[in-house]
Amino acid sequence: MTTHTPNEAHAIVLGASMAGLLTARVLSDHFDRVTLVERDAVHAEPESRKGQPQTRHLHGLLAAGLDIMTRYYPDLPEALVAGGALVQDMAEMMQWYTYGGYRQRFTLGRQAAVMSRPFLESLIRQRTLARPNIALADNCAVKGLTTTADHARVTGVQVERRGDDAGDQTLTADLVVDCTGRGSRTTRWLVELGFAAPSESEVKVNVGYATRLYRRDPNDPRSREWILLTPEAPRETRFGGMFPIEGDRWIVSMGGWMGDHAPTDEPGFMEYARNLPAPDIYNLMSRSEPLSDIVPHKFSSSLRRHYEKLARFPEGYLALGDAICSFNPTYGQGMTSAAMQAAALDALLTERKDDLAALAPVFFKRAAKVVDIPWQLAVGEDFRFPETTGPKPAGTDFINRYVAQVHRATRFDAEVCRGFLYVMNLLKPPSSLMLPGMMLRVWRANRGQAPRPLPTAQAAAQRQQTTPSRPGL
């Protein structure tokens, strides 16, 4: 390395959630020593820590994210399955109602994972901390950065340790990476050091949802299906998801945009489910035993910090994950985006042979390219609601009119659904849905040149009679 301590090259990662764990794993291939600094106490078993309110709600790991994580943790799919999670072809077990009908079910040829977020994170944490050059400093609050006298280079962090070894301490490093999430203090620290804060894009959506766990019968043919009900915006505002997770449980999250949030009392929660666009979740919930309280979560806005536009940035410092961009979580992109950013950092350090000089400008431009597509997908969908506010990308309304036709076409044409799922899983760019052959299929499906679906009640009855592996709910 071009910059190093006398004895070893050291990297510090702030935050030991998914982005931090993946970043530490990547950096362990490029540094002699990596230290993860986490504010909360961390335990071995799966848990939702105080600083992770979102981890108690529905999660899925997109195919692109699973691919990247498997590259760094080769036994991850087997460990997920051994622990009771589902790793499977997502389109084969999909029950996704949208725009008045169910998307076509078929074989996609790519696996995704369905599990609780704490379980996935515990597997990633175990494998990350098993690497001999990674150490965890938990129960340890970061008070600020340390720098050279001219503030041009970050040299480490000041921390406050709690517990048995309580006290202030300075940790020195060649590289510090902020993975503390949306609440990152990097923008404030930059200003204090004499740098400009990055510009921000904020798209306000006022999304809120509530989550509950239910008992799942593993012998029921429905127990391996993941159910998703998404709205035809702006006419509908509510969504619901019911995913099978480890421990023979269902996790149910329901909510809506623009203040149409799910209540947390028992009668209100069930009534909200009854009024979703389709009855699948309500019917199964009403026959299942609740295992937890009803937990709410609110998300006011998607937020993107444009570090790639800064003219100056201190050496020896980066931000990654939600510290750069936090998306509307209803689209399930956060973990995969963080994994893709960590992989981009890995590739950059490999290309540079671990040269850290002027690393930030190049990394932030690459991270921006990673973020561009999920940001486009998320804010594009959110701007279907006229109440959404914020910087609206040019052409959004035109694109949304076409994408609405794509959504409808996925109910009739498996190839259109395949193309849509590849984009949704961040495996292909949105432009792939606008290739001439795909546009022709979308046009034909919307012109009625494909089998029309039965009305919802009829369709459910027919599925129960003719498809034993996918009975009606």
Image (tube, rainbow, N blue to C red):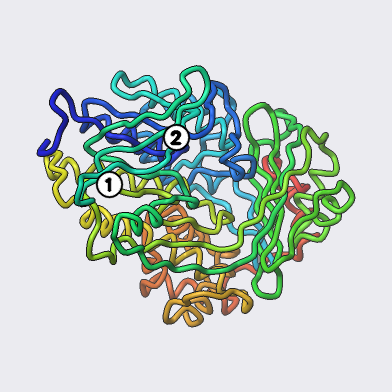
> Which percent across, then down, holds residue 44?
53, 21
Amino acid at dot 1: Tyr
Q: Residue furthest right?
A: 267
Q: Which residue is mark 1?
A: 317
- Category of crowding for the residue at label 2, using alpha-carbon neighbours closer than 10 angstroms: few (below 14), some (14–19), many (at least 20): many
Locate residue 345 relative to residue 201 in the image: left or right: left
Q: Is disc 2 placed on a helix, strand or loop?
A: loop
Amino acid at dot 2: Ala
> Which percent across, then down, holds residue 339?
38, 44
Residues under numbered marks 1 and 2 in contact, where contact means CB atoms less than 8 Å apart: no
Q: Is residue 463 above or below residue 415?
A: above
Most foreground residue, 223 or 258: 258
**Residue 143: quadrant of the picture:** top left
Q: Which residue is mark 2?
A: 16
Q: Residue at coordinates 32% horizontally, 60% vertically from top-left?
A: 307
Q: Is disc 1 placed on a helix, strand or loop?
A: strand
Q: Is residue 463 above or below residue 162?
A: below
Q: Residue at coordinates 45% horizontally, 52% vertically from top-left?
A: 425
Q: Residue at coordinates 82% horizontally, 48% vertically from top-left?
A: 283
> Which percent across, then down, holds residue 175?
25, 39
Task: Give the label on residue 157, or none.
Answer: none
> Which percent across, then down, holds residue 79?
48, 24
Most foreground residue, 233 or 141: 141
- CA gap between label 1 and label 2 equals 17 Å
